Image: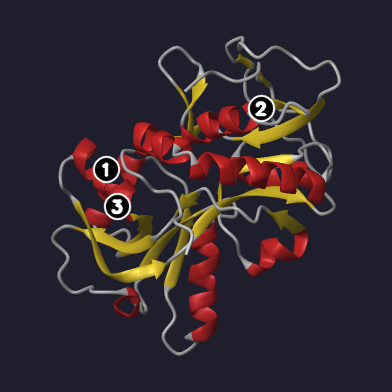
């Protein structure tokens, strides 16, 4: 696939709306062959740098991953825009949109009612995102989410959609709630905490469980039906319908010509692109 326009990867902006957001180091993408449109509107894109294989720094410190490759492909199809990709912590992307400093959030965002009240989502999804209850490989007493009633369930901090859905589960099951533990740790620490009983379970993407078992030995398993069936979308401020429609059009083209599937296979390992019904 040919390379797109020059994408500028810069440090994240300092946001002041009750807090200051510290952003990542400056990363410059490769010069691309299509040139620069002097009249192109700069679109500030907020993404992360520590969520492999979606958005992360490679061994040379260059920002890469599925998110970045898709953004390159989208930008290539939109000469009226120039994407300026900036690195933020996941939790601060929404803050940047609130502050008017980010035009497009790209970090495998799932829809939920709380987010939809505040933000505009793309209509075109670009990744499937099915989450499952995950436990240590030797746990045989847990076969689904209901078996975790009263037990310790790990959820990530920082506005993760899994945490949102676990909280919603508790609202619907007040007589048998989960004991949600909010924490942030490395993957290896998470696996160890599931094995030693610090947590009884968590909720993870099935493909992430496969990847962790390849990296750390077969120590985890998924159980039961999917806890959530979801897709991921770009996140915009309210009022950004023009940008949203343009990007949606580019995503549709990338789906139709197979580019999105190729990028998913290259970076994630399989075709995880949503299929139109």
Q: Can residue 92 be seen in this view?
A: no
Which residue bears the numbered disc 1? 212
Callout in the foreground (1, 3): 1
Which residue bears the numbered disc 2? 85
Q: Do the residues labelled 3 and 2 touch (CB within 8 Å)?
A: no
Of pointers 1 and 3, the one earlier in the residue sequence? 3
Q: Is mark 2 on a helix, strand or loop?
A: strand
Horizontal side, residue 137 vs residue 54: left or right: left
Of pointers 1 and 2, the one earlier in the residue sequence? 2
Question: Mark 2, residues whose alpha carbon is within 10 Å: few (<14), some, or many (≥20)?
Answer: many
Residue 179 against residue 138 in the figure, above or below: below
Q: How far apart are marks 1 and 3 (CA)?
A: 14 Å
Q: How does the figure colour the protein chain or chains?
A: secondary structure
Position of residue 39 measured from the top left corner of the image (x, y, whole percent): 86, 21
Residue 86 against residue 99 in the figure, above or below: above
Position of residue 130 measured from the top left corner of the image (x, y, whole percent): 40, 60
Position of residue 254 measured from the top left corner of the image (x, y, whole percent): 53, 39
Of the pair 193 and 87, the residue shown nearer to us: 87
Residue 203 against residue 225 in the figure, above or below: above
Q: Name the residue at 74% across, 31% down.
A: 44
Q: What element carries label 1?
A: helix
Q: Name the residue at 30% across, 40% down.
A: 188
Q: Is residue 66 visible?
A: yes
Which residue bears the numbered disc 3? 193
Question: Mark 3, residues whose alpha carbon is within 10 Å: few (<14), some, or many (≥20)?
Answer: some
């Amino acid at each position: 696939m040919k390379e797109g326009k020059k994408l500028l990867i810069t440090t994240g902006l300092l946001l002041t709306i009750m807090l200051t957001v510290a952003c990542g180091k400056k990363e410059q993408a490769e010069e691309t062959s299509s040139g620069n449109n002097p009249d192109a509107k700069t679109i500030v894109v907020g993404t992360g740098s520590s969520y492999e294989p979606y958005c992360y720094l490679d061994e040379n410190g260059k920002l890469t991953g599925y998110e970045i490759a898709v953004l390159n492909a989208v930008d290539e199809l939109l000469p009226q825009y120039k994407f300026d990709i900036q690195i933020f912590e996941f939790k601060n992307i929404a803050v940047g949109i609130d502050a008017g400093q980010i035009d497009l959030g790209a970090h495998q965002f799932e829809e939920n009612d709380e987010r939809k009240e505040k933000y505009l989502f793309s209509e075109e999804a670009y990744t499937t995102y099915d989450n499952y209850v995950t436990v240590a490989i030797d746990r045989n007493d847990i076969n689904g989410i209901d078996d975790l009633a009263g037990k310790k369930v790990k959820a990530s901090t920082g506005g993760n959609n899994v945490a949102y859905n676990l909280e919603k589960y508790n609202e619907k099951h007040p007589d048998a709630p989960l004991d949600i533990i909010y924490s942030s740790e490395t993957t290896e620490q998470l696996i160890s905490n599931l094995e030693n009983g610090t947590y009884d379970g968590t909720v993870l993407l099935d493909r992430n469980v496969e990847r962790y078992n390849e990296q750390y030995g077969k120590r985890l398993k998924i159980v039961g039906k999917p806890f959530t069936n979801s897709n991921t979308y770009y996140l915009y401020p309210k009022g950004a319908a023009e940008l949203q429609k343009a990007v949606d059009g580019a995503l549709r083209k990338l789906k139709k010509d197979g580019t999105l599937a190729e990028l998913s296979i290259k970076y994630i390992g399989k075709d995880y692109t949503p299929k139109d019904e």
